[in-house]
Image: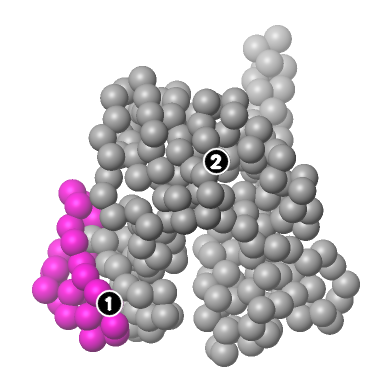
Amino acid sequence: MAGHSHAKNVMRHKAVVDAKRGKLFSKLSRYIISAARAGGGDPDMNLKLRYAIDKARAVSMPKENIEKAIKRGTGEIEGESYDEIIYEGYGPGGVAVLVEVMTDNRNRTNGEIKKIFERANATVGVPGSVGFMFDRKGLFVVDATKYPDEDALLSLALEAGADDLKRHDDAFEITCEPSNFSAVMEALRRGNIETTEAEVKYLPKVLKDVDLETGKRIVKFLDTLEDHDDVQNVYTDARLTEEMTAD
């Protein structure tokens, strides 16, 4: 019986993992389609597409999936077209929240996102209501235990067009303007510097402290948003701790 139970648990776990991977691949495909539609199918000429492909490769998305998404974006094969929307609002505790969405049905997604906000006693704001609290930046995170020479890393990053480098515990965080993201990424690659994160994202200008109970409510709210098929990214200015994110 124990073996049978274990096998069922393994199968259930695999199903959950496969479902999450499938949802992630779907979201990345939309991102690639949108990028290719906007700027063409050549990643050397289309920074957004190159970034989208890099994200897909980082999670081992199959090459054929990436190529198919590019062709859908350029119109070589038929496929859905997606609109990009940013929802702005206030989550539990009044923290600022930005939600990046890609959808083929604005009305459906609008209703579903608003319902998620309502269930969390959160509020969807008007465009611009919280966006000013964030900066759009390229962010690279490097393991400081593997690359301890901060001066050398700073010099390499700045020469490539980065704005700043800061150390947080065992990690270096390099920031740059989105237009310089590709150049900084290439410089890090040429220097054989591996990154644990490389992404263009919204960074809060000032973090807001919240208590443990509010933090847990915020995390649950953000998780629900991120689980929505049309949601690409979610950002907040809440300072969330490991204790708040623990199950």
* Residue 156 falls within the magenta-colored stretch: yes
12 lies left or right of 98: right
Which percent across, then down, holds residue 126? 53, 49
Earlier residue among tags 2 and 1 = 2
User: Where are the magenta residues, as a range?
Assistant: 144-171
Q: Decide: is 1 above or below 21.
A: above
- Name the colour scheme: one colour
Residue 123 badge? none
Residue 162 badge? 1
Residue nearest the observer in this picture, 178 or 109: 109
- Using the rendered image of the protein, determine whether residue 197 is visible from the camera's viewpoint: no
- The residue that disc 2 covers is 124
Q: Decide: is 54 above or below 60.
A: below
Quadrant, the C terminus: top left
Quadrant for residue 114, please give it.
top right
Quadrant, the N terminus: top right
Quadrant for residue 19, please give it.
top right
Total marks in image? 2
Report the residue that reaches farthest toward the right: 78
